[in-house]
Amino acid sequence: MEGLLLELCESTTYERGDGVKIITKEKPKHVNNLTYPAFQHPLAPPYPYPYKFLINQPDKCKNRKPFIVLAVLVESQDWESRHTIRETWGNERLYDVNVVRMFLVGLPVRIPDRTQQLLVEESKAFGDIIQQDFMDTYYNLTLKTLMAMEWVTKFCLSASYVMKIDSDMFLNVDYLVHKVLHPDLPVHQNYFTGYIFGRARPRRDPASKWYVPKEVYPHDKYPPYCAGPGYLFSTDMEKKIYDVAQEIRVIPMEDVFMGICLYELHIPLTKPPPRKCNYQKINYDLCKFKNLVTVHHYEKQELRTVWADFWTKKSQQC
């Protein structure tokens, strides 16, 4: 397969639905001997772009060697999810390895001034929020994930692994650490795993939440990728993905874009432990959850309720 990301002219004109014309004419970029013309489109987040850290924790990993960073993608105004995670699986003090918890947010869309003020206060109180100056929207999830890559690359390369995870997830950190990664073993290299989609195709219906037009991605299928709610990778992957992302076209589906980056890097996905990573909801069962890494669609009060039972009874025999 020749270059995944687009054969377009150096000069291209697009007209958005509001009548605004977008004209691109820039020098092409080269990755792996493939040429990617510069490109702008309403559904392609602008990147590379000098996004700035508005809230940062540059010393979070100073003088420590985290075994795993929990990089949680959460909406800027969703303080309830952040507080829930701090009191459940994101509580760094619960574990016998060094864990770093970080929440990744963009610029608030709702009540922006007040929400930003509250974010600054929350950051001072907990020291676990990272923010850059892009709008906190669904179509900017790729930018949010790349922010995590940039932050670890610049401020936390001492970590061994990163778990990128959404805020509506149940995460069994103990099982992940001791049954999947094993702190006593050498750190994996070129490691990227989660629930794998191997034959996904772009949605071409403009009404779809996951719509990707051919102008943004012309091919009929995506490379294999890990489901976005939660995936795990070794820290050496951070800089590799961050670097290649500077050279290829960004698309709004962040999990798909990670798969495209891996394709360009010629690094295959690592097969996950069978049936341990779930991107759908499973009804809570203590014995079942003890042997899982992730379960989707658990948040806020429901997550608190499940976690209270899980954590107090996890040593029970099944």
Image (cartoon, rainbow, N blue to C red):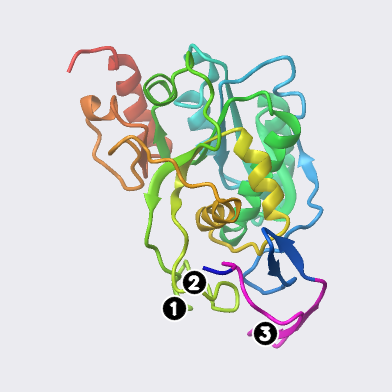
Task: Label 1, secondary structure: give it.
Answer: loop
Q: Residues within 10 Å of mark 2 (few under 14, many from 20)?
A: some
Say which of marks 1 and 3 sits in front. 1
Question: Which label belongs to residue 211?
Answer: 2
Q: Residue at x 44, y 78 (%)?
A: 205
- Quickly name the residue at label 3: 18
Which is more N-terminal, label 2 or label 3?
Answer: 3
Q: The residue under label 3 is which amino acid type?
A: Asp
318 sits to left or right of 239: left
Q: In this view, does 184 lie above or below 238?
A: above
Cβ atoms at labels 1 and 2 below 8 Å apart: yes
**Marks 3 and 2, how far apart in space?**
18 Å
Residue at mark 1: 205
Magenta region: which residues?
3-27
Residue at the (52%, 14%) spot, across then down: 97
Which residue is most to the left? Answer: 318
Dot 2 falls on a residue whose secondary structure is: loop
